[in-house]
Image (tube, helix red, strand yellow):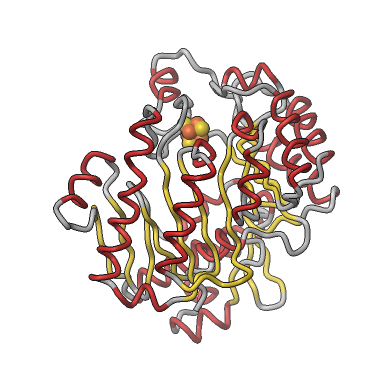
């Protein structure tokens, strides 16, 4: 069984105004004080859920937050901790999310030596005005220098995160960012639409009329431009927001979409094992307090029944370019999607949102752009 480990490091040097993750701006001392809690959590889990530890670990993902704020010694400690609890596959994909400014010195080299074999870099844009709007701390030049520095370290498996739909962004400036990004020849590119979530500064600004987002038609054009441009540049789309060179898909994220098991550590981290999903509390103090008294820092726990599992299989299947195998759906869930949703599927196909190919139903690029709407229609 494929099994992944996600470690959420919630600290950032600055909180971006659009960020909805559980993140904190903490001092170096507080960041260091968090590290022993991963060990406490693993120890407690190994007592209470020993079955999790008989799994071979195929992927390890340090996400956040900004785990590139960790020093090499701190990261080495976390990797050692992982190895002491799990049988880690020799070819495990070991990813770390990073901000460009953390990658200008010796860190890429040190991280690579430790066994990090994939970096996911929050470049977001290569236009300085857009980076400023997004509240990012780096410039386009610094991002470029970081990439050059990483390449010197020999670490080849890079993902570049980019954002479209930024206030003030145009299709031309988005295209320039994409053109520049593919010149670096990263193995993987993710393009995310800027979405305004309730807990963010951007939400407050939008509510008070101080933030003007590009019109939806413009965002759609940017998305479709990105898909076309990247596909022409030899990046194959395999998920709504993800493009890779052949064989460089994110194994860790793909496991999520294929409903494979994973364990999440750290505040707000989610886990999925067998038919259970659970999430840790979204609060560092409560996370620490619970672990201090020998309690798992759980916030919610859900058993996935057949109906929910079917919904997940449809929802996650449609996120992926390969879509859903209609026969498998019948075998696994005794559910005939075409029979149940015939009228709706006919409509979606007529609107060029879905297509059926070789027994699979999948979304078109236009369908991906409106996937939230399609999914809401499929599961009212
Ligand atoms: S650096 Fe990333 S995780 Fe941190 S606040 Fe910004 S977007 Fe969120």
**Outermost residue, left direction?**
293
Which of the image's four quarters has the C terminus? bottom left
Q: Nearer the viewer, residue 10 or 211?
A: 10
Q: Is residue 218 visible?
A: no
Percent x, y for residue 209?
44, 14
Percent x, y for residue 363?
63, 59
Q: Is residue 183 visible?
A: yes
Percent x, y for residue 107?
62, 39
Percent x, y for residue 39?
33, 56
Which quarter of the picture shows residue 347? bottom right
Residue depicted at 28% across the width and 65% down the height: 45
Determine whether, in the image, residue 366 is placed left or right of residue 266. Answer: right
Q: Is residue 37 above or below residue 259?
A: above
Residue depicted at 49% across the width and 65% down the height: 4
**Outermost residue, front direction?**
73
Q: Nearer the viewer, residue 115 or 300?
A: 115
Q: Is residue 264 above or below residue 132?
A: below
Determine whether, in the image, residue 116 is placed left or right of residue 178. Answer: left
Which quarter of the picture shows residue 307? bottom left
Q: Is residue 270 above or below residue 304?
A: above
Residue depicted at 51% across the width and 39% down the height: 71
């Amino acid at each position: 069984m494929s099994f992944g480990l996600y470690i959420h490091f919630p600290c950032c040097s600055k909180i971006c105004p659009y960020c909805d993750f559980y993140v904190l701006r903490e001092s170096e001392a507080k960041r260091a004080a968090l590290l022993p809690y991963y060990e406490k959590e693993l120890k407690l889990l190994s007592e209470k859920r020993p079955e999790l530890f008989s799994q071979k670990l195929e992927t390890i993902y340090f996400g956040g937050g900004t785990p590139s704020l960790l020093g090499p010694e701190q990261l080495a400690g976390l990797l050692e901790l992982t190895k002491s609890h799990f049988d880690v596959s020799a070819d495990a994909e070991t990813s770390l999310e990073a901000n460009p400014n953390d990658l200008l010195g010796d860190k890429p080299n040190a991280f690579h030596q430790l066994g990090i074999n994939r970096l996911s870099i929050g470049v977001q844009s290569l236009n300085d005005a857009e980076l400023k709007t997004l509240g990012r701390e780096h410039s386009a030049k610094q991002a470029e220098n970081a990439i050059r520095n990483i390449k010197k370290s020999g670490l080849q498996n890079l993902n570049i995160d980019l954002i479209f739909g930024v206030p003030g962004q145009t299709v031309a400036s988005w295209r320039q960012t994409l053109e520049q990004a593919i010149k670096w020849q990263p193995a993987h590119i993710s393009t995310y639409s800027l979405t305004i979530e309730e807990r963010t500064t951007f939400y407050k600004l939008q509510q008070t009329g101080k933030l003007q987002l590009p019109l939806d038609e413009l965002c759609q054009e940017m998305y479709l431009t990105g898909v076309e441009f990247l596909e022409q540049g030899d990046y194959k789309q395999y998920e709504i927001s993800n493009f890779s060179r052949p064989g460089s898909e994110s194994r860790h994220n793909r496991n999520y979409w294929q409903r494979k098991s994973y364990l999440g550590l750290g505040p707000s981290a989610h886990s999925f094992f067998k038919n259970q999903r659970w999430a840790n509390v979204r609060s560092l103090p409560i996370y620490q307090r619970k672990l201090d008294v020998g309690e798992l820092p759980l916030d919610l726990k859900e058993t996935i029944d057949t109906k929910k599992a079917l919904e997940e299989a449809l929802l996650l299947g449609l996120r992926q370019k390969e879509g859903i195998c209609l026969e498998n759906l019948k075998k696994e869930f005794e559910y005939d999607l075409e029979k149940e949703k015939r009228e709706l599927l006919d409509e979606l196909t007529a609107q060029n949102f879905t297509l059926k190919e070789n027994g699979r139903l999948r979304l078109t690029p236009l369908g991906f752009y409106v996937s939230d709407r399609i999914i809401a229609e499929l599961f009212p």
